[in-house]
Image (spheres, rainbow, N blue to C red):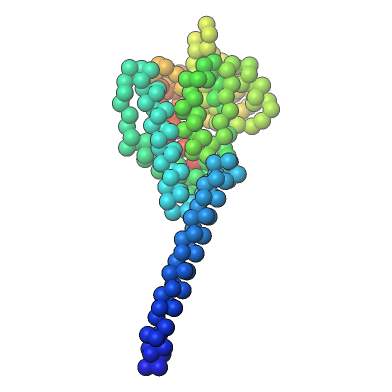
Amino acid sequence: MSGLEDFLRSNQSYIDAVSALSSVINLFGWTLGGILLYRAWRSNAIHSVSVGPLNFRLEQEAVEAAAAASRDWNAKGGSQNVDVGRIRKTVGRAFAPEVADNLIGRSILWVDDNPANNELAVRALRKLQLDVEQATSTEEGLAAMARRHYDLIISDMGRGDNMRAGYELLEAVRARGNKQPFLIFAGSDTPEFRREAEERGAQLSTNDMLELIDTIVSYLGDK
């Protein structure tokens, strides 16, 4: 044992150098790997990663996007209040492995004659790994559904002079035998609207951005 100790003491400088070199190599490898993963994710080569702080960054970006969407939508109604705690709760649940695995790549069709109103909300949903396509009319929406399957549909209510366009789209969707979740996102939110939407076969009628996102996570992530 004393011989080994003497050997280690006499060669300590070499051992320290090897240890330092190993640490540098490991640090370089993790840094390079993180950069490559991040670039792949940004280019949509991969949908989701979970490597320590990188996964935290993806979740933080989703929180920031949802907060921006909520702030923008609330400002249109004259309010600047944003419940960041509630946003973090929803986004945190969306990034839980058992939920995120179900969300990745799930498809949403959003029908609204003014898609610019939903630009930030669409960005937030895409940060949750969702595939969102937009249409500007009932006809365009139905044509899109004829081309591909969507896991969930969002619609506004009034389009042009037709103040019940959302219900008409819902009726047309159900008449085709499509039973995917149908959410109405409109400027008005009253108990009467919610009740009629439910009676007509919608799963939600709301003007609350966070309720919309939370409901989407629930329907697509928990199943």
Pick whichever, 202 or 187, lies toward us: 187
Residue 24 lies, with reference to residue 39, above or below; the image says: below
Task: Name the residue furthest right.
Answer: 147
Residue at x 36% of width, y 17% of height = 77
Using the rendered view, name the quadrant where residue 91 is placed.
top left
Rendered residue at 52%/55% (across/down) = 32
In this view of the protein, which residue sits in the foreground, 106 or 33?
A: 33
**Rendered residue at 33%/35% (across/down):** 84
Residue 196 percent location from the top left of the image: 45, 18
Q: Is residue 57 visible?
A: yes
Pick the residue in front: 18 or 208.
18
The quarter of the picture where residue 4 lies is: bottom left
Vertical position of residue 186 compared to residue 98: above or below: above
| Residue 152 in the image, given as x and y percentages of width and height | 55, 31
Residue 141, x across and y down, in percent = 61, 21
- Is residue 61 positioned above or below 98 on the image? above
> Is residue 205 shown above or below 223?
above
Residue 203 appears anywhere in the view: no
**Residue ID at (49%, 10%):** 163
Say which quadrant the N terminus sits in: bottom left
Residue 2 position in % (x across, y down): 37, 93
Q: Quadrant of residue 174?
A: top right
How many dots with numbers? 0
